Amino acid sequence: MRNPVVVGERVYLRPFEVEDASVLAEASHYETDTFMERGRELQSEVAFERYIRELYEHQPTDGEVQFAVCLIENDECIGMIGLEFVDLINGVAETGSWFHNPEYRNKGYGTESKHLILEYAFHRLHLERIVSVVFEPNTRSAAALAKQGYKPAGRLKWDDLKDGRYQDLLLFDLLPEDWLEARERWREEQRQRREQAINA
């Protein structure tokens, strides 16, 4: 592992390195139209290099904390996850994540990464509440948030135009106690899966 900040069973979070720009640029090419409000936004490696350099110009970071999500087994960067609009006075931030090509999806990496960033938010930054917003067609992300303990907090009607009609933006929020309960359920599910694999 290189410069780990939070470590899980299969993935860890670390600060971005300029070399990660190529991975992020490639990920933007894999992204499907379903999860982007305005469709695919292909970005260059140079643009991501600039983003990474600017990310660490301000200490503490200017309301944003982003980490590379890496596999423990080989240190491969498979995506990014972080906190935006960090308000340390009121103890609130918004989470966001973005993963590499589809081969890393539906394997639990996203859920594990989300629990790691929430651990960082609640236990290290001592935030009191986390919020997340999901574009209405993104049903996969909405389902994932529910598994992590987020509760529906409202909806913004007709937030953006997509596929010829206005779509809503769904709002969710999360308190520490709800996250801890959800994390324990997730850990128990992981334990049961491991036992089933051993006994199979």
Image (spheres, rainbow, N blue to C red):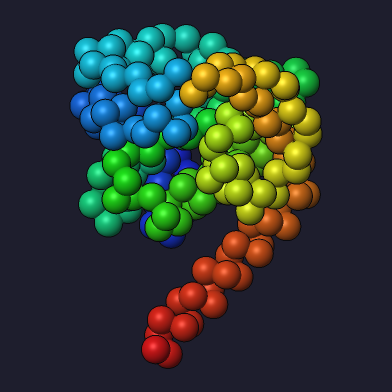
Q: Is residue 100 visible?
A: yes
Residue with the most extreme front position: 164
Residue with the most extreme bottom position: 199
Q: Is residue 163 left or right of residue 21?
A: right
Number of numbered discs visible in the structure rendering: 0
The structure residue drawn at horizontal position 22% and vertical position 13%, both measured from the top left corner, is 46
Quadrant location of the C terminus in the rendered image: bottom left
190 shown above or below 116:
below
191 shown above or below 55:
below
Residue 176 place in picture, x, y as percent: 74, 44
Residue 92 place in picture, x, y as percent: 71, 26
Residue 140 place in picture, x, y as percent: 53, 45
**Quarter residue 67 falls in:** top left
Q: Is residue 196 left or right of residue 160?
A: left
Q: Is residue 125 visible?
A: no
Query: Camera-side residue: 66 or 143?
Result: 143
The structure residue drawn at horizontal position 57% and vertical position 70%, both measured from the top left corner, is 189
Residue 193 place in picture, x, y as percent: 49, 75
The structure residue drawn at horizontal position 29% and vertical position 50%, both measured from the top left corner, is 103
